[in-house]
Image: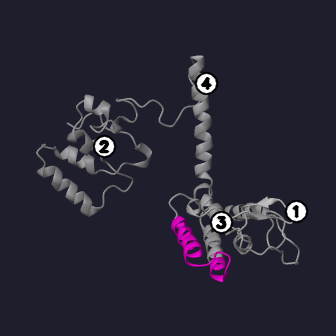
Amino acid sequence: MGEDREPRQATFGNNGELETDRDPEASTETDFGEPKAANETDGGYNRYAVSSLLQKAVRRSDEELAAWAAWELARSGYAWNLWDRLNLYVVEDLQAGDRIALTIERYEKLATERWDEAGWKGRLCAIHAALAAARAPSTREAANADEYFRKVAAVRANAYEQGEEPAVDFPAGNLEPGGTYDAIFDGHTGEGARLERGKRFFKTRGARVGPEGEADLSARWQRLSMVLDEIEFSEKEITHALEAVEPESLWDEPDSLE
């Protein structure tokens, strides 16, 4: 998105310093008729402060502040900064799977490809996108997960160097056939292939879904497919293959389905 745009032309701030961050077509004066300093908005604010306000407003679901901050950045020649930040919030501050990512992308395309970013339509897009972000479920789950996993990796590496067991480990622990996650070692993996785990293992263990299980029509197709297969699946195998994977026993599988 923002990375594909043409580079900003260099301009000079009121102290003669070189500035490349502000749109060269933006106003060079504040609302008070004073020359704008580097990184200053039309309202006389530092654009880094406004950008930070936007992010915190999105996190705290403050719609009015989010809308104003987006409007201030867009009208001041910092729309590129606004869109970069809003796209960052999609992955840093909003709940996974929320449709807000597509909404923000659409508003950005309208503002940057169809209309003038700082013009009336561009500003409306900025406000709409900021409001959508502020109204979306907020969470830092991805950032928290990344930070936690990185620290666990460091603990594991340090323990390895010391020849010790790590105090904490990744959720997967040791991935070995016969362990907690034995179902992952079907014929699509090297270990599963060496164990000669073919279609029977995959259909009865590796292909199971949860927590609701297959929908009625899909379950019907799966049952009929297994009945018609060249492999003679037992009724117990077919029933197990169609059973939903329960949340409290995600990785439990019977030792035998005979």
Q: Is residue 28 above or below residue 257?
A: below
Which region of the structure is painted magenta? 99-124
Kindly identify the residue that appears in the image at 54 percent across and 71 percent down.
109
Q: First in sequence, mark 3 or 4: give its number.
A: 3
- Quarter holding residue 216: bottom left
Left or right: residue 207 versus residue 129 is left
Image mark count: 4
Asked if labels 1 and 4 touch by Cβ distance under 8 angstroms, the answer is no
Q: Residue furthest top?
A: 163
Q: Is residue 80 above or below residue 64?
A: above
| Foreground disc of the pair 3, 4 | 3
Q: Residue 206's mark?
A: 2
Element at label 3:
helix
Q: Residues within 10 Å of mark 3 (few under 14, many from 20)?
A: many
- What residue would you read off at disc 3? 80
Q: First in sequence, mark 4 or 2: give its number.
A: 4
- What residue would you read off at disc 1? 15
> Could you say where residue 246 lies in the image, as x and y percent from the top left?
39, 48
Q: Residues within 10 Å of mark 2 (few under 14, many from 20)?
A: some
Q: Is residue 60 above or below residue 152?
A: below
Q: Nearer the viewer, residue 158 or 13?
A: 13
Q: First in sequence, mark 3 or 2: give its number.
A: 3
Q: Residue 158's mark?
A: 4
Element at label 4:
helix
Q: First in sequence, mark 2 or 1: give its number.
A: 1
The amino acid beneath tag 4 is Asn
Kindly identify the residue that appears in the image at 63 percent across and 65 percent down.
83
Left or right: residue 118 versus residue 188 is right
User: Which quadrant is the N terminus positioned in?
Assistant: bottom right
The amino acid beneath tag 3 is Trp
| Foreground disc of the pair 2, 1 | 1
